[in-house]
Image (spheres, grey):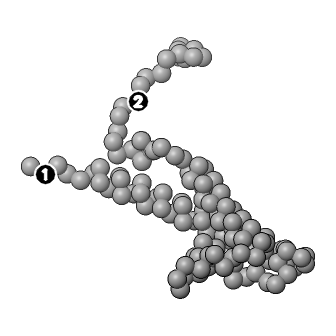
Amino acid sequence: MATRKRFGARQSRTVYNPFEPTYGVLVNTRTVLLIGTLLGIASSGAVLTLLWFGVAGVLQVGGTDLMRLLWPSSVMLVMGWRRTIPGIMITASAVAINCLLYTLIAYSTWRLVRLFRRVEGRRPVSE
């Protein structure tokens, strides 16, 4: 007759494995994706706010247009970006594209950092 484990019975402890991909991770995938999305919304919102008040010229630093750097899909904006239905829809799609772009950048950076940390941990000890 097989013995059944009782609910709440103490399980065996897992063995420390430094090469485990999830060991020592401070944030998970969902958090990284959420951070990327929030950064995309924040940058789009900041640029749209400056455009709304008509002071988007402060985004010019030397010969660099920071609006194109922070929000590359802002080139899609039309004159009636806040007045007409098509303009509002184009603006919403530009914001969504920017959120996806920032999310992709955050996720790629996170994966590269994890990869380099894992590869660094596997180096043999030199004698």
| Residue 10 in the image: above or below residue 80 | above
| Residue 29 in the image: above or below residue 66 | above
Q: Is residue 43 left or right of residue 53?
A: left
Residue at image coords 41%, 30% = 14
Mark 2 Cα-neighbour bin, 10 Å: few <14, some 14–19, many ≥20: few
SS at mark 2 in the image: loop
Q: Position of residue 75 (x, y in %)?
A: 69, 83
Q: Earlier in the sequence, mark 1 or mark 2?
A: 2
Q: Which mark is residue 14?
A: 2
Where on the picture, by quarter, is residue 68?
bottom right
Residue lying at the far left of the rendered structure: 127
Mark 1 Cα-neighbour bin, 10 Å: few <14, some 14–19, many ≥20: few
Is residue 4 at least partly visible in the picture? no
| Residue 124 in the image: above or below residue 12 | below
Front position among marks 1 and 2 = 1
Give the camera-side residue of 111 and 92.
92
Q: Is residue 118 left or right of residue 25?
A: left
Residue at image coords 32%, 56% = 119
Q: Is residue 20 left or right of residue 40?
A: left
Spatial CA distance of label 1 from label 2 is: 29 Å
Where on the picture, by quarter, is residue 52?
bottom right
Is residue 62 at least partly visible in the picture? yes
Residue at image coords 66%, 79% = 57
Q: Position of residue 61 (x, y in %)?
A: 55, 79
Give the camera-side residue of 62 and 10.
62
- Amino acid of disc 1: Ser
SS at mark 1 in the image: loop
Q: Which residue carries the number 1 mark?
A: 126
Q: Which mark is residue 21?
A: none
Residue at image coords 59%, 80% = 60
Q: Position of residue 103 (x, y in %)?
A: 60, 62
